[in-house]
Image (spheres, rainbow, N blue to C red):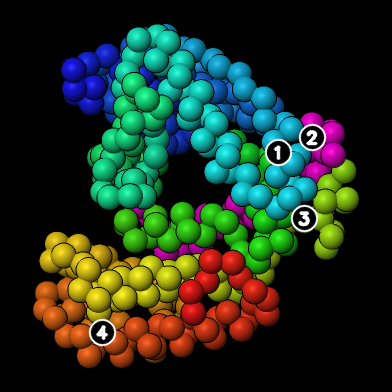
């Protein structure tokens, strides 16, 4: 049976945030939705849970609440400076898919905005026997599309946040040097899901604690002052540092595309799509960081439709030179850098 057919019974992973609520509302008229699964852990904002409850009730969906324990993982992650969001998201999604499988629903719609990391798929086996559908990516929604859908709901409350994420982001920055969500922000820009300005604001938001540190400490059973060598964060870093992170990660995308172009490993369709995307993003992004204007990226539309290895190599060297300049600004060794 083809599990991704809208005519087959499906479940929605409903966190109660904007993306999952928009997914449920839109898909309810197009897919055979039978249930919604909300995964709850110790730091889930109650506003999110109430949004999920209201949404399921209004759509007449069976609402399953699954509880997982992440407190000990959060404690270890903060101590070690590990990326908290990745582990949390995987745990929550796995729990939702397993519960859907128990209900006999083998298709799970999620609120993921981006297509898969490998290839261009929007459907993925996750876990075995269940097909996950990245619904906003399937519909090619932008953030504006999502906002429009939920804005029509008088009952939807946007006043929710993640209490632990900003502290996890700051601890990762303290240990590694950059915001771990910068890669996601760049993907959102390149896929045209959000504008460069929106992505910059998103990164600033991820570094902005909105919950009192004392309450977070009480829930964690961990003194944050013992975790942060430079002091418990009270707000985001200077915007210049956030911009530098975003610029460097965007240049990594451009450097990778140009390398593939020079080596001839991009097929015609990939070359046309990727270089056109990067040109559009860089044109907007230059308003945030004018250093990218000096790269001469205006050659990208021509490279997208014809071969000019010499021009690509010149641009590639300019990109690498700017990346090296940015790395010097960090004043430290940054893991995963290539130049």
Mark 4 and mark 1 lie on one chain; the one further toward the N terminus is: 1
Identify the secondary structure beneath mark 1. Answer: helix
Category of crowding for the residue at label 1, using alpha-carbon neighbours closer than 10 angstroms: few (below 14), some (14–19), many (at least 20)? many
Mark 1 and mark 2 lie on one chain; the one further toward the N terminus is: 1
Tell me where residue 145 appears, x and y as whole percent: 32, 43
Identify the secondary structure beneath mark 4. Answer: helix
Do the numbered discs 2 and 4 sit on residues whose CB atoms are within 8 Å? no
Residue range corresponding to the magenta coloring: 193-222
Magenta highlight: main SS: helix
Identify the secondary structure beneath mark 3. Answer: loop
Q: Which residue is mark 1?
A: 74
Q: Is residue 111 above or below residue 248?
A: above
Do the numbered discs 4 and 3 sit on residues whose CB atoms are within 8 Å? no
Q: Which residue is mark 3?
A: 234
For image coordinates 42% across by 10% down, the residue present is 102
Q: Is residue 208 visible?
A: no
Q: Is residue 207 magenta?
A: yes
Q: Which residue is mark 2?
A: 220
Do the numbered discs 2 and 3 sit on residues whose CB atoms are within 8 Å? no
Do the numbered discs 1 and 2 sit on residues whose CB atoms are within 8 Å? yes
Q: Using the numbered discs, state the Cα–Cα distance from disc 2 to disc 4 in whole angstroms.
A: 51 Å
Q: Using the numbered discs, state the Cα–Cα distance from disc 4 to disc 1 in whole angstroms.
A: 44 Å
Q: Nearer the viewer, residue 338 or 85?
A: 338
Q: Which residue is mark 4?
A: 312
């Amino acid at each position: 049976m083809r599990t991704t057919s809208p005519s087959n019974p499906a479940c929605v992973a409903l966190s109660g945030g904007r993306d999952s609520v928009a997914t449920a509302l839109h898909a309810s008229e197009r897919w055979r939705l039978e249930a919604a699964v909300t995964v709850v852990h110790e730091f889930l904002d109650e506003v999110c849970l109430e949004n999920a409850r209201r949404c399921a009730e209004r759509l007449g969906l069976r609402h399953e609440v699954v509880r997982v324990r992440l407190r000990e993982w959060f404690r270890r992650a903060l101590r070690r400076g590990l990326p908290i969001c990745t582990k949390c998201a995987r745990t929550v999604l796995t729990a939702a898919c397993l519960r859907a499988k128990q209900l006999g629903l083998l298709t799970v719609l999620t609120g993921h905005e981006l297509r898969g990391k490998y290839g261009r798929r929007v459907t993925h086996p996750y876990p075995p026997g269940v097909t996950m559908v990245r619904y906003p990516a399937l519909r090619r929604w932008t953030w504006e599309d999502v906002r429009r859908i939920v804005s029509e709901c008088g009952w939807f409350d946007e006043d929710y946040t993640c209490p632990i994420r900003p502290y996890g982001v700051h601890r990762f920055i303290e240990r590694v040097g950059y915001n771990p969500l910068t890669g996601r922000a760049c993907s959102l820009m390149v896929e045209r899901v959000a504008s460069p300005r929106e992505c910059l604001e998103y990164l600033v938001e991820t570094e902005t604690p909105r919950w009192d540190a004392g309450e977070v400490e009480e829930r964690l059973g961990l003194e944050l002052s013992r975790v942060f060598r430079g002091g418990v964060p009270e707000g985001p870093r200077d915007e210049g540092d956030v911009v530098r992170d975003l610029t460097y990660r965007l240049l990594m995308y451009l450097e990778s595309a140009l390398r593939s172009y020079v080596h001839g490993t991009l097929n015609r369709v990939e070359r046309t799509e990727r270089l056109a995307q990067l040109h559009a993003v860089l044109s907007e992004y230059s308003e945030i960081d004018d250093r990218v204007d000096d790269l001469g990226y205006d050659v990208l539309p021509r490279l997208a439709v014809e071969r000019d290895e010499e021009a690509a190599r010149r641009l590639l060297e300019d990109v690498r030179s700017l990346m090296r300049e940015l790395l010097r600004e960090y004043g430290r060794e940054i893991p995963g850098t290539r130049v």
